[in-house]
Image: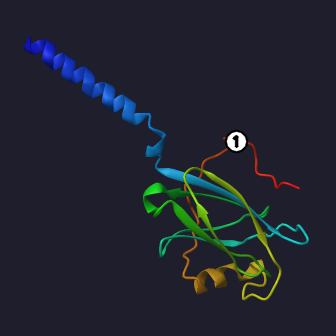
Amino acid sequence: MRFAKNLLFTFCFLFLIGVNAQRPDLKKDITVTLITYEKTTNDTVRFSIIEVFSGSNRIKTSVSDFDGIGVFKIKVKDIFDENIRLKVHGPKCVIFEKKYEIKDDLKIEIPLKYGKTEYVDFTELHIMQSKLNIKPVFSEELECGFEDQPVYRKN
């Protein structure tokens, strides 16, 4: 009888662990994929500095690539109240700032506007990072290849 109780307890315990392991809400990282472009001319805005805030804390920084694409991961534990605020500094562009509700991976387009700014040319990237107190990251763990289709802007 005691053996049967122990066996039943072990089976229930293993079943609950297996069910918990398959819960999608236990995801550790959320992937944010964005593309930056100028709103009126549709020009790609390269080397935009991206700041991600949640609550009052900056939780992530990144820089868009030569194609204006930025892909980065945010730890779920860093996100406060399922909201993030993006602040994007594009060369020759007015600072873009917008709040997003985030429950799963996010793919967004960032329409920037040309205007007065401190960040005039991508050659000033390191100067702007210094002003914004951002330490350049030279080796971030990246995943090779695409899980989904490549990022393209809607026309």
Q: Relative to 113, say whether 75 is above or below.
A: above
Quadrant showing the C terminus:
bottom right
- Which residue is denoted by mark 1 in the rendering? 148
| Most foreground residue, 63 or 1 | 1
Quadrant showing the N terminus:
top left
The residue lying furthest to the left in this view is 2
Q: Residue at x 72, y 72 (%)?
A: 48
Q: Residue at x 71, y 58 (%)?
A: 108
Residue 55 in the image: state x and y as whole percent.
48, 71
Q: Amino acid at mark 1?
A: Asp
Residue 86 in the image: state x and y as whole percent.
62, 70
Q: Left or right of 30: which side holds 115? A: right
Q: Relative to 150, say whether 136 is above or below.
A: below
Residue 94 in the image: state x and y as whole percent.
75, 82
Q: Residue at x 76, y 51 (%)?
A: 151
Residue 12 in the image: state x and y as whole percent.
26, 24
Q: Left or right of 71: which side holds 53? A: left
The residue lying furthest to the top in this view is 1
Q: Residue at x 61, y 63 (%)?
A: 100
Q: Relative to 1, say whether 152 is above or below.
A: below
Q: Relative to 144, say whether 44 is above or below.
A: below
Badge 1 marks a residue whose secondary structure is: loop
